[in-house]
Image (cartoon, rainbow, N blue to C red):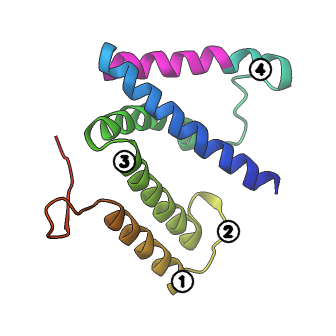
Amino acid sequence: MQGILLAIISGIFISLQTVFNTRVSEKFGSWATTTLVLGLGFLTSLPFFMVMDHTSLFSFGKVNKLYLFSGLLGVVLVFCIMKGISLLGPAYSISIVLISQITLAILIDSFGWFGFEKVPLTHYKILGIFLMVLGVIVFKWNKKSGKGTVSVNTQ
């Protein structure tokens, strides 16, 4: 139950953060906002780390060095999601992000990538992804034209 609650809180915070980031980037630019957001994240997390964690910041031990590049992924994530929201709007953009996250997570599970235990890929998982994509298409269905076309703003 705790995992579900934390996942729900994460989803709420991701949506809020990305919308806030997009609004800031409209005034200061995407790279300045990315720098500000990640810098503030560092300044916020550092005191918690110093008080609550009892390890050295640079004692990586036997961690695969590839995984230490996750901060670089964070830079790409913050930048891309801000641009996606500014081009597509929050709901549409986050829906696409969610589908891509789940698709990659299913692949990671199914192939046992990055040291995770393999979980069989079933037709139910594929159907679930298909239904999510279909849901986003229905969500974006444009009834204004009377022709039932899907409208995608890619400006």
> Quick check: 37 left or right of 24?
right
> Quick check: 56 left or right of 116?
right
2 or 1: tag closer to the N-terminus: 2
- Amino acid type shown at disc 3: Ser
Using the numbered discs, state the Cα–Cα distance from disc 4 to disc 3 in whole angstroms: 32 Å
4 or 2: tag closer to the N-terminus: 4
Q: Quadrant of the N terminus?
A: bottom right
**What residue is disc 4 on?**
48
Q: Label 4 near label 1: C-beta < 8 Å?
A: no
Q: Residues within 10 Å of mark 2 (few under 14, many from 20)?
A: few
Residue visible at 73% across and 55% down in the picture: 4
Using the numbered discs, state the Cα–Cα distance from disc 2 to disc 1 in whole angstroms: 19 Å
Look at discs 2 and 1 and give the one toward the viewer.
1
Using the numbered discs, state the Cα–Cα distance from disc 1 to disc 3 in whole angstroms: 25 Å
- Amino acid type shown at disc 2: Glu
Using the numbered discs, state the Cα–Cα distance from disc 4 to disc 2 in whole angstroms: 31 Å
- Amino acid type shown at disc 1: Tyr
Residue visible at 30% across and 35% down in the picture: 86
Q: Quadrant of the C terminus?
A: top left
Residue visible at 38% across and 39% down in the picture: 81
**What residue is disc 2 on?**
117
Image quarter of residue 120: bottom right
- Amino acid type shown at disc 4: Phe
Point out the stretch of residues depicted in magenta.
Answer: 28-44
Residue visible at 66% across and 49% down in the picture: 8
Please check the rendered image and state whether residue 31 is part of the magenta-colored stretch, yes or no. yes
> Quick check: 85 left or right of 121?
left
**What residue is disc 1 on?**
124
